[in-house]
Image: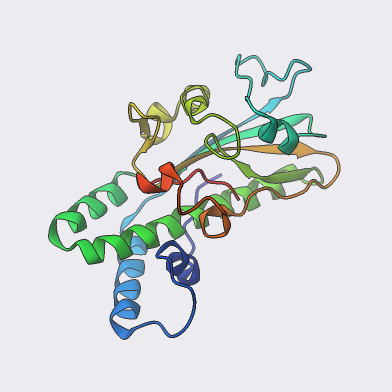
Amino acid sequence: MEPRLTGIDRREALAYLGWRGGPVPEELDVALTRCQTLLMETVRPRAVWRLLDIRPDGALGDTGFVPAGESIRAHLAGCDQVILMGATLGAESERLLRRAQVEDMARAVVLDACAGAAIENVCDNLCADLAAALAPRHLTGRFSPGYGDMPLCQQEMLCQVLDVGRRIGVSLSPGGLMIPQKSVTALIGVADTPRTKGPGGCPSCDRRDSCTIRKEGGSCGGR
């Protein structure tokens, strides 16, 4: 199952920029188009996933990983399996962002927003592919460490279970944020009946303005 970047939603990128509607200035419109094109031509997304049973004690398979918090327990209610997934835009995106931050901070901000929309597209495509592969079973939305009351520190265990360093080239900072920045890990519940979809990503999150993950350039990946 190959990760796919099929497009970059301009409205989503604008939402990351804090745009609240109305005409988009020509200068910003041009910058968005250039950044979209650059990312589509340059990045090579990578992804990994595992399907695990949810044990009665809440542990996932034989990994020893027990997701913590009432939010994730509610999210997985009624599910007997869970998908652990990780996805990244890869080192190419990190190099583009760092270069832009040195050369032109205004362009770097737009590029960062477009990259945020790009990793969401990769994750959405992966979830669609997983849903098709596991049909007729049903999937929840994505839920990541740092969302709700699930501790961000559980990112480390999730990354270990997925072996993201070796398999997709993602590492963790001392604060638990992923490098490359435009990377996401998440849990997705699997059940026999349709489940309520989970959180809707940064643009629709009521914590987006105070979120420490976003301030560091990352995303919890909730969708």
Q: In the drawing, does residue 133 fall left or right of residue 169?
A: right
> Residue at (72%, 38%) from the top-left corner?
75
Residue 26 rendering spot, x and y as whole percentages: 32, 85
Residue 78 rendering spot, x and y as whole percentages: 82, 34
Closer to the camera in the image, 123 or 27: 27
> Residue at (48%, 73%) from the top-left corner?
20
Closer to the camera in the image, 43 or 156: 156
Q: Vertical placement of 63 versus 123: above or below?
A: above
Q: In the drawing, does residue 102 fall left or right of residue 217?
A: left
Closer to the camera in the image, 120 or 169: 120
Q: Count all numbered tags in the image, as a single digit.
A: 0
Residue 61 rendering spot, x and y as whole percentages: 67, 19
> Residue at (82%, 47%) from the top-left corner?
194
Figure quadrant of residue 80: top right
Determine the residue located farthest toward the right in the rendered image.
Answer: 193
Q: Vertical placement of 42 versus 85: above or below?
A: below
Q: Quadrant of the image for the N terminus?
A: top right
